[in-house]
Image (tube, helix red, strand yellow):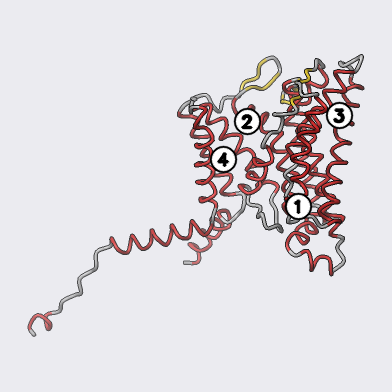
Amino acid sequence: MMSTAAATSPVKAVTRSRLFWPAVVLAVLLAANLAFTPDFFAVRLQGGHLYGSLIDILHFGAPLILVSLGMTLVIATGGIDLSVGSTVAISGALACLHISESPDPGSVATVLTAAGIALGTAVLLGAVNGLLVAKVGVQPIIATLILMVAGRGVAQLITDGQIITVTSDPYKLIGGGYWLTMPFAILLSALVVLATVLLTRSTALGLLLESVGGNPVASRLVGIRAMRLVALVYVFSALCAALAGLMVSSNVSAADGNNAGLWIELDAILAVVLGGTSLNGGRFSIGGTVLGALIIQTLSTTVYTIGIPPETTLVFKAFVVIAVCLIQSPAFRAKLAARGARARRTARPHAAAPTTNREVGA
């Protein structure tokens, strides 16, 4: 009995991990594509660049990973950021506008200046959100909703309601170029994720964020500067969104103030939830968020692979997301297990009581 318990305890520890179910769902979605695309897992090296469906999922999912990363830390403090989509549009519009008006759009200095303008504006936008939430006391959903609506209009003003196209090889590298055989967007998002993990897990920053989100009153009483931390995470979220905006606009060599980053805030929130982070604040999982973002991107790829009609795409995705959320719910799995146990007990035939010779003679 001791050996059986020892064997089952590691299994229980793995299944209780917050990363287990997102990883299982991602693996199932990836495996499902094999039925329609036999070479789905094939990765080939051509012209010094890696190509394949798995590379495409990582490549096109990089902007969502960045936005979801910032959203994770905001949600960890008990907040929400609905303005990331508008920040994506504004950053891309500012960068493309500067490059298009520059006399030398192909120079590295021009691209660095454009990226600096976009990131600096994002810091300002994030600081405004953080000030409204932390200092003024506006509810996060209201404070960021203001920028969500107004920011889209600002992006339209920057582009003058038009699509700004640019021709710049250094700028193309950010979202559509390759470096060391890999898409540069994958490497950039991986670097940001790694830096965030080191900052939140190798220092006390992660614990402080969790304490602010779990119990803001208690954290303030023990001397944690909660307002400063809350403002900081909104700035970080805006920076991540700005990087995503540079990737999106760079990948298509154009800035669209109306459609760039449209509804990406909802996908980011969904990725955070799928990754196991609670919307109530407190504990968070960066690895789970990355898996959640990859699940959403893989789901989009699966929709195109299967050939689902465009008019039913959103309905299909909604059903899959509901199923994923139910699978990840411990309460739902417990109810299924209890119902299965009751069904097995009902189906099991009752054993007849043994009959002795004395009972037969009586």
**Pointers 1 and 2 in contact (C-beta within 8 Å):** no
Which residue is disc 1 drawn over? 140
Which residue is disc 2 drawn over? 57
The percent position of residue 43, horizontal first and vertical second, equals 60, 24
Secondary element at tag 2: helix
**86 left or right, relative to 221:** left
The percent position of residue 111, horizontal first and vertical second, equals 87, 23
Q: Looking at the picture, which amino acid does disc 4 mark?
A: Leu
Which residue is disc 4 drawn over? 26
Which residue is disc 3 drawn over? 115
Q: Nearer the viewer, residue 47 or 323?
A: 323
Secondary element at tag 4: helix
Q: Nearer the viewer, residue 285 or 4?
A: 285
Q: Earlier in the sequence, mark 4 or mark 1?
A: 4
**Pointers 3 and 4 in contact (C-beta within 8 Å):** no
Q: Earlier in the sequence, mark 3 or mark 1?
A: 3
Q: Looking at the picture, which amino acid does disc 1 mark?
A: Pro
Circle nearer the viewer, 1 or 2: 1
**Pointers 3 and 1 in contact (C-beta within 8 Å):** no
The percent position of residue 352, horizontal first and vertical second, equals 20, 71
